[in-house]
Image (spheres, rainbow, N blue to C red):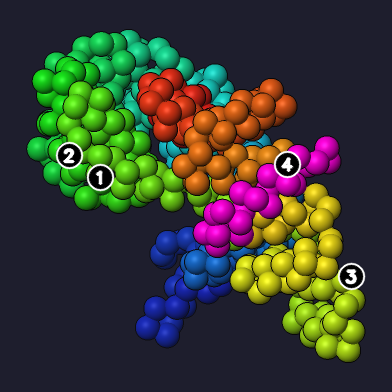
C-alpha cells in the first residue's frame, strides 16, 4: 500500500456509557490512507458517484487517475472495466478483465463481460476458451451455456451449439430467446420441422418477439412456394413489431421478389417498399450527414463568422468560400455547405476533393441525380479515394441503376476486398438484379446478417 497509514480507534458507546474490554463485539478499525493512496481513494469515491449518476465519461478520467496513484487498486480497475464494456470499448476492457479474473476466477460478472467483449469483437476462438473457463468454475450457469451456444453457432459447430442451447433450455425453459436460438441451430443442421417447432414455442412464450417471428418466417420459407404466404405474413409481423429489423426487411424483399417471379404481380408495390426501406436502413452507414466531409480542425462559430466576414468583403475569395463550405459540411449544415460548393463549382473549381465533398453532401440530402453526376466526375479522377468510389456506387444503386452500381462495386472489391461497406453494397446490387441468394450470401459475409 502506498502512502502512510493512520489507525483511529473508535469507542463503542451504549446509552452514554463505555463498555469494558470483552463486554461487546470488537470495534472495527477505521483505516484512513494518506498521501497518494488517499488521493486515489478520493478520486475513486467521486468516480463512483458519477457512475451512480450515469456519467461514465466524467468518471473515466477519475478512475484512471486513481490507478495512476494506486495501480493495484481492485475497485478502480473493476469500475474502469465496467465503463469500457458499457461504452463498447471491448479491446481496452479485455486486458483489465483478464487480470481481474486471475484474482477472482469465480466472479460471474467478470466472466460475462469478458466473453461478451471477445464475442462482439469477433475473437471467436478466444471467446470459446473464455466460455470454457467460465463453465469450469460454474458448469450449470445458464448465461454461460447460452452464450457458449451462440459462439459455437458462429463457429459453424451446430451440433455442439444445439447441445449447449438444450442445456440452457432445461434451466431456462420459459425463456423465449433460448428456444429461438435453439431453433436457429436446428435449422442450420437441416432439421426444419424441429426448428419451426422451437420458433413457435418461443412465440407462445413471447408473442412480441420480432426475432422469433423473423426466424419462423425464414424456416417456413424453406418449404418453398407452397408456404410462401405464411412466411411473408411472419416477416410482416416481425416488421410490425420492429420496423428497423433489417434482416426481416431483406428476407421479406426476397420472398416478395420470388412471388413476383412466379407471376404474382400484386406483390410488386410491397417489394418496392421493402427495397426502399432496406436502402434507407443502410444509408446511415453508407452516407451519414458528415460522410465525405473534409477534415476541419476548427469548426467554432468564431471561425465561421470570420470566414463569412471575409466573403462579404471579397465575394470572389475562393479559398475562404472553400473553407466555409468545409466547415459547414463538417458541422452537418449540408444545405448551406452545398450552396457554397455549387458557387465554387460555378467559379470553375473542379478537383477530386471538391467534387467528392459536394457529391457526398448531395447524396446525404437526397439530391440523388446531382450526387450521381458529381461523384461520377470525382470517381473518374486518378486521385479518387475508395470512399468516393463507394459513395458513387451507392448513388447509382439509390438511383435504380443497379447494373452500373454492380460494376463499380466489383472494381472496388478488387481494390478494397476488406471494406465491409463495399461488400454489403455489392450484395444489395446483386439482390436488386434478381440474384437474390447470391446477394444475401455476400451481405452475410460482410457481417450484416447472423
Q: Which residue is mark 3?
A: 319
Mark-to-mark CA distance, 3 and 1: 48 Å
Q: Which mark is residue 172?
A: none
Residue in the picture at 18% in, 44% down: 237
Residue in the picture at 47% in, 42% down: 400
* Element under disc 3: helix
Cβ atoms under marks 4 and 1 closer than 8 Å? no
In this view, 92 is above or below 118: below
358 falls in the magenta region: no
Count residues near mark 2 (Cα–Cα under 10 Å), then give few for <14, some for 14-19, many for 20+: few
Mark-to-mark CA distance, 3 and 2: 55 Å
Mark-to-mark CA distance, 1 and 2: 7 Å
Q: Which mark is residue 379?
A: 4
Q: Which residue is mark 1?
A: 269
367 falls in the magenta region: yes
Q: Which residue is mark 2?
A: 266
Mark-to-mark CA distance, 4 and 1: 33 Å
| Magenta-drawn stretch, dominant element (helix, strand or loop) | helix
* Element under disc 1: helix
Mark-to-mark CA distance, 3 and 4: 23 Å
Q: Is residue 130 visible?
A: no
Which is nearer the eye, 87 or 299? 299
Residue in the picture at 47% in, 73% down: 12
Q: Is residue 339 visible?
A: yes
Q: Toward which corner of the image does residue 368 lie, by quadrant?
A: bottom right
* Element under disc 4: helix
- Residue 174 appears at what percent x and percent y? 15, 36
Query: Range of the magenta residues?
Result: 362-384
Cβ atoms under marks 3 and 2 closer than 8 Å? no
Cβ atoms under marks 1 and 2 closer than 8 Å? yes
Mark-to-mark CA distance, 2 and 4: 39 Å
Amino acid at each position: 500500500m502506498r502512502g502512510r497509514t493512520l489507525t483511529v480507534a473508535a469507542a463503542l458507546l451504549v446509552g452514554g456509557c463505555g463498555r469494558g474490554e470483552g463486554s461487546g463485539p470488537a470495534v472495527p478499525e477505521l483505516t484512513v490512507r494518506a498521501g497518494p493512496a488517499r488521493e486515489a481513494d478520493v478520486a475513486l469515491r467521486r468516480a463512483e458517484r458519477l457512475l451512480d449518476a450515469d456519467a461514465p465519461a466524467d468518471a473515466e478520467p477519475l478512475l484512471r487517475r486513481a490507478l495512476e496513484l494506486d495501480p493495484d487498486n481492485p475497485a478502480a480497475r473493476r469500475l474502469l472495466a465496467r465503463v469500457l464494456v458499457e461504452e463498447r470499448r471491448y479491446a481496452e476492457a479485455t486486458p483489465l478483465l483478464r487480470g481481474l479474473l486471475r484474482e477472482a476466477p469465480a466472479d460471474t460478472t467478470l466472466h460475462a463481460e469478458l466473453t461478451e467483449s471477445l464475442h462482439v469483437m469477433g475473437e471467436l476462438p478466444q471467446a470459446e476458451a473464455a466460455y470454457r473457463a467460465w463453465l469450469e468454475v460454474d458448469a450449470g450457469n445458464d448465461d454461460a451455456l447460452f452464450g457458449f451456444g451462440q459462439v459455437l453457432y458462429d463457429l459453424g459447430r451446430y451440433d455442439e451449439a444445439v447441445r449447449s442451447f438444450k442445456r440452457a433450455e432445461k434451466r431456462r425453459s420459459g425463456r423465449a430467446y433460448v428456444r429461438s436460438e435453439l431453433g436457429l441451430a436446428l435449422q442450420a443442421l437441416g432439421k426444419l420441422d424441429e426448428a419451426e417447432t422451437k420458433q413457435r414455442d418461443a412465440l407462445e412464450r413471447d408473442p412480441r418477439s420480432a426475432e422469433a417471428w423473423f426466424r419462423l418466417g425464414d424456416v417456413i420459407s424453406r418449404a418453398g412456394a407452397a408456404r410462401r404466404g405464411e412466411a411473408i405474413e411472419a416477416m410482416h409481423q416481425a416488421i410490425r413489431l420492429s420496423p428497423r429489423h433489417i434482416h426481416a426487411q431483406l428476407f421479406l424483399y426476397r420472398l416478395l421478389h420470388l412471388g413476383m417471379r412466379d407471376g404474382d404481380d400484386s406483390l410488386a408495390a410491397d417489394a418496392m417498399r421493402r427495397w426502399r426501406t432496406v436502402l434507407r436502413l443502410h444509408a446511415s452507414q453508407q452516407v451519414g450527414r458528415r460522410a465525405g466531409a473534409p477534415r476541419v480542425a476548427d469548426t467554432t462559430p468564431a471561425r465561421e463568422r470570420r470566414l463569412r466576414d471575409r466573403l462579404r468583403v471579397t465575394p470572389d475569395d475562393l479559398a475562404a468560400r472553400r473553407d466555409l463550405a468545409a466547415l459547414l459540411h463538417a458541422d452537418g449544415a449540408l444545405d448551406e455547405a452545398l450552396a457554397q460548393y455549387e458557387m465554387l463549382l460555378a467559379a470553375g473549381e473542379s478537383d477530386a476533393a471538391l467534387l467528392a465533398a459536394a457529391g457526398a453532401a448531395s447524396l446525404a440530402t437526397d439530391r440523388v441525380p446531382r450526387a450521381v453526376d458529381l461523384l461520377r466526375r470525382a470517381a473518374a479522377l486518378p486521385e479518387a479515394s475508395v470512399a468516393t468510389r463507394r459513395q458513387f456506387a451507392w448513388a447509382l444503386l439509390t438511383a435504380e441503376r443497379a447494373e452500373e452500381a454492380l460494376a463499380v462495386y466489383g472494381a472496388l472489391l478488387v481494390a478494397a476486398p476488406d471494406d465491409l461497406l463495399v461488400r454489403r453494397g455489392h450484395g444489395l446490387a446483386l439482390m436488386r438484379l434478381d440474384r437474390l441468394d447470391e446477394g444475401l450470401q455476400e451481405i452475410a459475409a460482410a457481417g450484416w446478417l447472423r
